[in-house]
Image (cartoon, coloured by chain):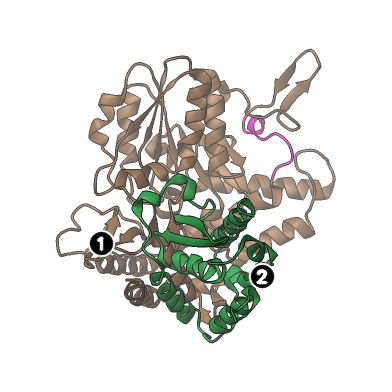
Chain colours: A green, B brown
């Protein structure tokens, strides 16, 4: 049976908590960022840009069979890792599934309190953009 | 005084971050507070709390005395002719806004010109833009060369009989190069143009003598020179301050108030409307006393020069790194010699690595540095970057910290590549 969104969220939290050191968590995020699909330069447009980040982050989406697939890129690799983490969880899900999430996963892995305020805002903006995309496609 | 004695004055330096000793290299943003400054703030807030210049009771007398003593201390520190020329503000931004507004009202009209430089932070750009918009005046910009030096040679081309004021930074918060402001002031005065010097960094890293410089205005923040946040200073020449209308109206700044007409108090009170940051301003006295002590200690100066030269050499000799603000002569191999025009402030970028990633990784190694545009977007555009990483040091930073920083930077670059 396909894993539920909740299962994936818990899996990510478990995976992340394996690392005691923050530098190891960053290494993991950096590797995760590299796993993203190629993001075309032609889609690095202002309307795909997520506001509120110190670095530039673009988020693109498409809908197939009622599911939303996300792709993203950033000029900073840790930011790219963070958006990859969200994509790993929320890509390939239906809008209803996405909107049913409480998005507490970011708190549970300690990303919010361990990132600078500007970065924390960036994370909030990323989540808002994912929710917004889900709401638009409901 | 040796560096370990200096460190003992600053409680924040004892703390650990993520289990590692804090290496605080963001001193150009704000410096840590020494104990005597916090003691003064606490004294003023706890046992000496009263409004100043008003009541005749003892607490008010004491509070007024402390506040005015601080004004005296500032006047001494920058060698102002008279303490009435020292206006307390909330910071360098407020000081510059005050001049941009009040000087603009008094002296600027349509088609007049104002000159700033490409090296300014937003605080010394936006207030002038706003004034120019209001007065329909024209803002002109003196460029910066590739190594971060002002193109002083181009200044005379920009000066015209319509130039009303020149606003220039003493030391850019990005480039860390001491600008030849005395020379700039000399040139401007030949054209009868007054000069405002933004001393946000200059007040920390150079001996400021406003009479020797002959600047018309000198502005700085208290929190970069060990005083409380929310404190700032504007020094101005008497004739200009007298001719400028008040920036804000309210209590304290008045002579007599009638509904038919109000007269204003003389400077400095004319520019200090309302209840001031009394406790904060009072901390300027112990703060500047400490600054004087630190600045006049030759063995400490030698030590901090060595730390600066070590970092300058390490960063310049690393071909992954592009440093902004390179002192003249340092491209030769003798970086060991003292680089008088460079302060211990290093903004740089690393090829292929985003500044924000670096700052984030360094933070987890216990190192606090700044990343981003550093409130100087035009300067970022000048160098074609979206941001930089900046390490800025204070006299309490050690050679060991500098070495640890260089080691961690290398590790971070390798991790992020």
- At horizontal 74% and vertical 33% (from top left) the residue drawn is B252
Q: Nearer the viewer, residue A93 or A40?
A: A93
Q: Nearer the viewer, residue A52 or B124?
A: A52
- The quarter of the picture where the N terminus of chain B appears is bottom left
Q: Label 1 lies in what chain?
A: B
**Residue sitting farthest toward the front:** A65
- Which quadrant of the figure has residue B378? top left
Residue A67 makes an appearance in the image? yes
Position of residue A12 relative to residue B185, above or below, is: below
Q: Is residue B29 left or right of residue B228?
A: left
Q: Looking at the image, how many numbered discs can be counted on the residues?
A: 2
Q: Nearer the viewer, residue B370 or A38?
A: A38
Report x, y in % for residue B118. Answer: 35, 39
Most common secondary structure along the magenta stretch: loop
Q: Secondary structure at mark 2?
A: loop
Report x, y in % for residue B398. Answer: 41, 73
Residue B238 makes an appearance in the image? no
Q: Which residue is mark 2?
A: A104
- At horizontal 48% and vertical 46% (from top left) the residue drawn is A47
Report x, y in % for residue B356. Answer: 43, 62
Range of the magenta residues?
A: B267-276
Q: Tell me the crowding category of disc 1: few under 14, some 14 to 19, or many 20 or more residues within 10 angstroms, Cα based.
A: some
Residue B219 - label: none
Report x, y in % for residue A128. Answer: 61, 56
**Residue sitting farthest toward the left:** B332
Q: Which residue is mark 1?
A: B338
């Amino acid at each position: 049976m396909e894993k539920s969104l909740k299962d994936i969220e818990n899996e990510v939290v478990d995976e992340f908590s394996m690392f005691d050191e923050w530098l190891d968590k960053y290494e993991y995020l950096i590797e995760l960022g590299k796993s993203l699909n190629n993001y075309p330069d032609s889609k690095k447009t202002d309307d795909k840009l997520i506001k509120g980040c110190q670095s530039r982050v673009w988020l693109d989406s498409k809908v197939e069979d009622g599911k939303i697939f996300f792709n993203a890129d950033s000029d900073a690799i840790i930011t790219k890792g963070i958006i990859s983490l969200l994509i790993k969880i929320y890509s390939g899900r239906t809008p209803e599934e996405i909107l049913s999430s409480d998005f507490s996963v970011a708190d549970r892995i300690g990303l919010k309190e361990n990132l600078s305020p500007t970065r924390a805002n960036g994370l909030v903006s990323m989540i808002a953009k994912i929710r917004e995309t889900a709401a638009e496609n409901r | 005084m040796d560096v370990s004695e200096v460190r003992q004055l600053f409680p924040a330096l004892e703390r650990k971050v993520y289990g590692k000793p804090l290496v605080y290299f963001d001193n150009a943003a704000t410096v840590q507070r020494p104990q005597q400054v916090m003691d003064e703030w606490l004294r003023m807030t706890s046992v000496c709390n009263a409004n100043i210049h008003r009541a005749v009771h003892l607490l008010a007398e004491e509070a007024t005395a402390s506040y005015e003593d601080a004004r005296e201390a500032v006047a001494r520190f920058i060698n102002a002719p008279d303490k009435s020329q020292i206006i307390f503000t909330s910071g360098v931004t407020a000081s510059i806004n005050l001049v941009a507004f009040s000087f603009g009202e008094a002296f600027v009209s349509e088609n007049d010109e104002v000159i700033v430089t490409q090296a300014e932070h937003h605080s010394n750009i936006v207030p002038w833009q706003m004034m120019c918009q209001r007065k329909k005046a024209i803002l002109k910009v003196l460029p910066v060369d590739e190594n971060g030096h002002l193109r002083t040679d181009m200044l005379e081309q920009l000066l015209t009989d319509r130039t009303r004021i020149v606003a220039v930074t003493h030391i850019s918060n990005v480039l860390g190069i001491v600008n030849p402001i005395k020379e700039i002031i000399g040139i401007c005065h030949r054209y009868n143009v007054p000069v405002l010097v933004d001393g946000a960094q200059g007040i920390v890293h150079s001996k400021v003598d406003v009479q020797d410089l002959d600047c018309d205005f000198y502005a700085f923040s208290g929190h970069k020179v060990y005083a409380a946040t929310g404190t700032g200073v504007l020094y101005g020449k008497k004739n200009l301050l007298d001719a400028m209308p008040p920036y804000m109206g309210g209590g304290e700044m008045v002579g007599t108030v009638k509904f038919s007409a109000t007269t204003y108090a003389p400077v400095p009170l004319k520019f200090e409307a309302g209840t001031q940051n009394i406790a904060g301003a009072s901390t300027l006295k112990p703060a500047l006393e400490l600054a004087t002590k630190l600045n006049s200690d030759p063995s400490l100066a030698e030590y901090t020069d060595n730390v600066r030269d070590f970092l300058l050499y390490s960063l310049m000799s690393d071909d992954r790194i592009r440093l902004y603000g390179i002192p003249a002569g340092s491209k030769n191999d003798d970086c060991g010699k003292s680089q008088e025009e460079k302060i211990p402030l290093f903004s740089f970028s690393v090829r292929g690595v985003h500044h924000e990633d670096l700052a984030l990784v360094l933070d987890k190694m216990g190192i606090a540095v700044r990343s981003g545009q550093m409130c100087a977007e035009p300067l970022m555009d000048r160098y074609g970057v979206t941001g930089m990483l900046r390490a800025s040091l204070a006299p309490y930073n050690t050679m060991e910290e500098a070495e640890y920083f260089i080691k961690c930077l290398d590790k971070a670059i390798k991790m992020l590549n």
